[in-house]
Image (cartoon, grey):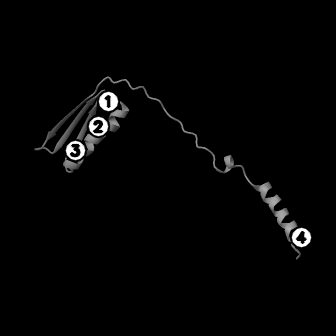
C-alpha cells in the first residue's frame, strides 16, 4: 500500500470518527441537585429519660421534636443508651 493511499484512508477514518464523536455534555451530563429548604424556627423541645435498673427498662418521653431534632439529638441519645445498656428494653412516647 502506498503512502498516499494510507494517508487517504487515514483521513477517511478521521472524518468518520469525528462524525461519531459525541458532545461532552452528552457524555458527561451535569447532575441536577435538588435542595429542599426547611424553615429553621426554633420552638424548643424536651426529652425526658427515665432508667429503671431493677426492671431493665429505659423510658423516653419527647415533645415538640422536629424531624431534624429527631435525627440529630434523639437518635444519638437513644443509640448511646442502647450501647450502654444493651439488654434493657427501650420504650418511647412522642408528643
Q: Nearer the viewer, residue 26 or 17?
A: 17
Q: Secondary structure at mark 3?
A: helix
Q: CA distance from mark 2 to mark 4?
A: 77 Å
Which quadrant, please, contains the N terminus?
bottom right
Q: Which residue is mark 2?
A: 74
**Earlier sequence position, callout 3 versus callout 4:** 4
Q: Residue furthest left?
A: 54
**Earlier sequence position, callout 2 versus callout 3:** 2
**Earlier sequence position, callout 1 versus callout 2:** 1
How far across and down, in percent of the image, does residue 90 sit? 23, 42
Q: Nearer the viewer, mark 3 or mark 4?
A: 4
Residue at 82 percent of width and 63 percent of height: 13
Residue at 53 percent of width and 36 percent of height: 34
Q: Which residue is mark 1?
A: 65
Q: Which residue is mark 4?
A: 4
> Do callouts 3 and 1 mark residues in contact (Cβ within 8 Å)?
no
Q: Which residue is mark 3?
A: 81
Left/right of residue 29 with respect to residue 60 in the rendered view = right
Q: CA distance from mark 3 to mark 4?
A: 81 Å
Amino acid at each position: 500500500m502506498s503512502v498516499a493511499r494510507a494517508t487517504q484512508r487515514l483521513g477517511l477514518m478521521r472524518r468518520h470518527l469525528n462524525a461519531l464523536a459525541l458532545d461532552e455534555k452528552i457524555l458527561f451530563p451535569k447532575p441536577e441537585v435538588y435542595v429542599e429548604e426547611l424553615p429553621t424556627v426554633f420552638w424548643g423541645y424536651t426529652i425526658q429519660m427515665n432508667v429503671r435498673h431493677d426492671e431493665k427498662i429505659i423510658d423516653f418521653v419527647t415533645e415538640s421534636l422536629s424531624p431534624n431534632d429527631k435525627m440529630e439529638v434523639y437518635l444519638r441519645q437513644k443509640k448511646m443508651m442502647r450501647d450502654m445498656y444493651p439488654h434493657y428494653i427501650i420504650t418511647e412516647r412522642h408528643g
